[in-house]
Image (spheres, rainbow, N blue to C red):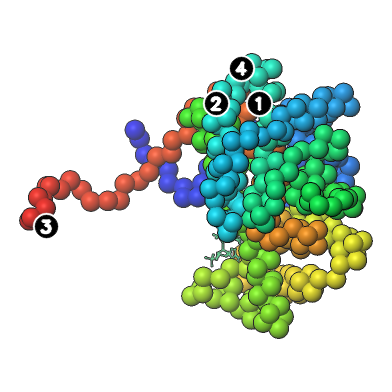
Amino acid sequence: TGAITLDPGYKNSGACKSAITFLDGEEGILRYRGYAIEDLAEKASFLEVSYLLIFGELPTSQELERFETNIRKYTLVNEEMKNIIDGFPKTAHPMGVLSALTSALTAFNPKSVNVENEKELYEGICKTMGKFLVIATWTYRKAMGYPLNYYDNTIGYVDNFMKLMFSLPTGPYSTNPKVVAALDKLFILHADHEQNCSTSTVRMVGSSHAGLFASISAGVSALWGPLHGGANQAVLEMLEEIHKAGGDVEKFILKAKDKEDPFRLMGFGHRVYKNFDPRAKIIKVAADEVLSSLGVEDPLLDIAMKLEKAALEDEYFKARSLYPNVDFYSGIIYRALGIPTDMFTVLFAIGRLPGWIAQWVEMRANKEPIGRPRQVYVGSPLRDFVPADKR
Ligand code: CMC
């Protein structure tokens, strides 16, 4: 088989050719299908960006309308799914429940999405966009013991997220348009990031020709980890801890630098960005805007800014090119919008969904081979079997 190139963590291995997202880590550039992330975050809507990622072009107004209409068509989730949610304890982490529910969708939609048939593919994509949003919010309703809500066809996708989460049968419900606009922007910033851990997982699972829901469910599990999407929850918990400890950021910088201490500065560092994370720049400005427009004063924002400044001036972080990443400020916004901490990574998943779908479709359309890395075996050479009584 020839020599094997060992590359743990795939730091230098390309796994595929892709026409979806361009990322230049040295220059801090991120583009979806050729459009600058800064432009999209400011001017586009999340569904427009989803369409762009999945289908390759910005939609015309008719195409966008059709996309929204078709998503709405599939937002009902089979009532039997409720039996599955009922089986979880209330204390279950929403990401675990979301992964399980996404996987359970395969049982109610057993027909695999057919990439060769345009109509079926379109239907499968809209189904995924519709149902995933609903079950994502159900993980929160379950934890709160609230009745599960249904999608409201009279309002938009991101509006629906808030309504699905927070409307109660007992009272009137209204959302602040500023909240919806902030969420829309956050979802856009999370929508794709080329071959990150969860996306590579989605492609890897799909490469065995497992279905779209099964592949996405695996992506949710990969995203959950604190080194990846779970970092947004971890950042907020870290900021709370620093706040409780009197706001002493230097102490935590020292801990992060101590190689004997497993603590890492959450929300700092990135595998690819070695200069700055363009998403973090946009999010930092958005955090400031959202907090002031909602009139929220959060001491954690001050701590985050102090921590960022201290780290950026520190030799350890400078030498390793460690900068704040997308997760550093996003949690502060989510918190200001009233989203509970353990739901942060679920929001990341809602934002990343179109990216996962786009990458899965591209992988199948390009007829990529099954993902199957090799290894360098370092175990024992051949040994004789020893019967149990002789061991
Ligand atoms: N705090 C302290 N030291 C760090 C940190 C950090 N956050 N990140 C990296 N380092 C050090 C690391 O110890 C190593 O030092 P040395 O060369 O002395 O051994 C050096 O920097 C290189 O780090 P690495 O772990 O080899 O880099 P990686 O590319 O494998 O990991 C990372 C990238 C994002 C997993 C890592 O920076 C990290 O754990 N950051 C904290 C978690 C986080 O914020 N994750 C979100 C990533 S962005 C969005 C997303 O994917 O969800």
Distance from the alpha carbon under mark 2 to that under mark 4 = 17 Å
Quadrant of the displayed image that contains ligand 1: bottom right
x, y percent for residue 158: 80, 43
Compared to residue 292, the image places residue 15 above or below, namely above
Compared to residue 214, the image places residue 121 above or below, namely above
Earlier-in-chain disc, 2 versus 1: 2
Task: Assess disc 1: are there few (<14), some (14-19) or many (≥20) residues with their C-alpha within 10 Å of its C-alpha.
Answer: many
Earlier-in-chain disc, 1 versus 4: 4
Q: Residue furthest left?
A: 390
Task: Assess disc 3: are there few (<14), some (14-19) or many (≥20) residues with their C-alpha within 10 Å of its C-alpha.
Answer: few
Earlier-in-chain disc, 3 versus 4: 4
Distance from the alpha carbon under mark 1 to that under mark 4 = 12 Å
x, y percent for residue 134: 70, 41
Q: Which residue is labeled 4 in the image?
A: 116
Q: Which kind of residue does numbered mark 1 sit on?
A: Gly
Distance from the alpha carbon under mark 3 to that under mark 4 = 56 Å
Q: Which residue is labeled 1 in the image?
A: 124
Q: Which residue is labeled 2 in the image?
A: 110
Q: Which kind of residue does numbered mark 2 sit on?
A: Pro
Is label 1 or label 4 in front?
1
Q: Which residue is labeled 3 in the image?
A: 391
* SS category of the residue bearing label 2: loop
Residue 271 circle label: none
Is label 3 or label 1 in front?
1
Instruction: Please state which of residues 31 and 143 is positioned toward the viewer in this rendering.
Output: 143
